Amino acid sequence: MLQFNLAANISIRNPNKKIGIYYDRIEARAFYEDQRFGYDALTPFYQGHKNTSVLNVVFKGQQAVTLQGEELTQFNQERTSGLYSIALELSLRIRFKLGKVKTARFKPKVECDDLKIPLNGSPVAGISNNKCEIQF
């Protein structure tokens, strides 16, 4: 049984000078060895142009996670090192705004793979600079 209490701050940058973004739906999921262990639905918001917004995501609870073979070996190595490799995924429903015009909705997915997370909040250098991929 996996017990977890994970808080993540995710920065989203809108570098555009004229286009704003409506985030109508934001769902965050956390995975360990391709098995989902956490879910958080975030509050919709509007992001203005040339703006950085920070999403505060919290995963807390317990979940059965079955590990076998290489996954179990990997888990034991991570337990020894104190750093666990997880993945975060954001499923979004967004609209763009240019002046008074709003676009139709898009459903991009943001994937952040191989994030190294320390056990029990131990500070570890380098975990705050992860880049994620966006798929439209």
Image (cartoon, grey):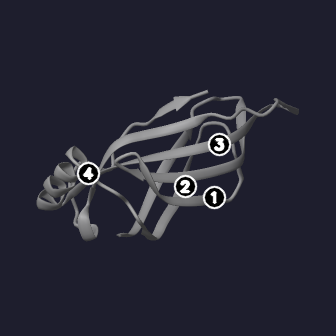
Judging depth in this view, the residue of 29 and 120 nearest the camera is: 29
Crowding around mark 2 (Cα neighbors within 10 Å: few <14, some 14 to 19, many 20+) is some
Which mark lies nearer to you, 2 or 3? Answer: 3
In the image, is 18 to the left or to the right of 6?
Answer: right
Residue at the image point whose x is 18% and y is 55% from the top:
78
Q: Is residue 43 above or below residue 15?
A: below
Tell me the CA gap for discs 2 and 4: 34 Å
For the residue labelled by badge 2, is the local secondary structure a helix, a strand or a loop?
Answer: strand
Tell me the CA gap for discs 4 and 3: 32 Å
- State the image quarter where residue 39 is shown: bottom right
Residue 60 appears at what percent x and percent y?
46, 70
Count the labels in the image: 4
- State the image quarter where residue 43 is shown: bottom right
Residue 64 appears at what percent x and percent y?
41, 65
Q: Which mark is residue 42?
A: 1
Residue at the image point whose x is 47% and y is 38% from the top:
111
Which residue is under mark 2? 55
Judging depth in this view, the residue of 85 and 64 nearest the camera is: 64
Type of the residue with mark 2: Leu
Q: Earlier in the sequence, mark 2 or mark 4?
A: 2
Which residue is under mark 4? 68
Q: Earlier in the sequence, mark 1 or mark 2?
A: 1
Q: Is residue 76 above or below residue 114?
A: below
Mark 4–mark 1 contact, CB under 8 Å? no
Q: Quadrant of the N terminus?
A: bottom left
Type of the residue with mark 4: Gln
Judging depth in this view, the residue of 36 and 135 nearest the camera is: 36
Q: Quadrant of the C terminus?
A: top right
Tell me the CA gap for discs 4 and 1: 33 Å
Crowding around mark 3 (Cα neighbors within 10 Å: few <14, some 14 to 19, many 20+) is many
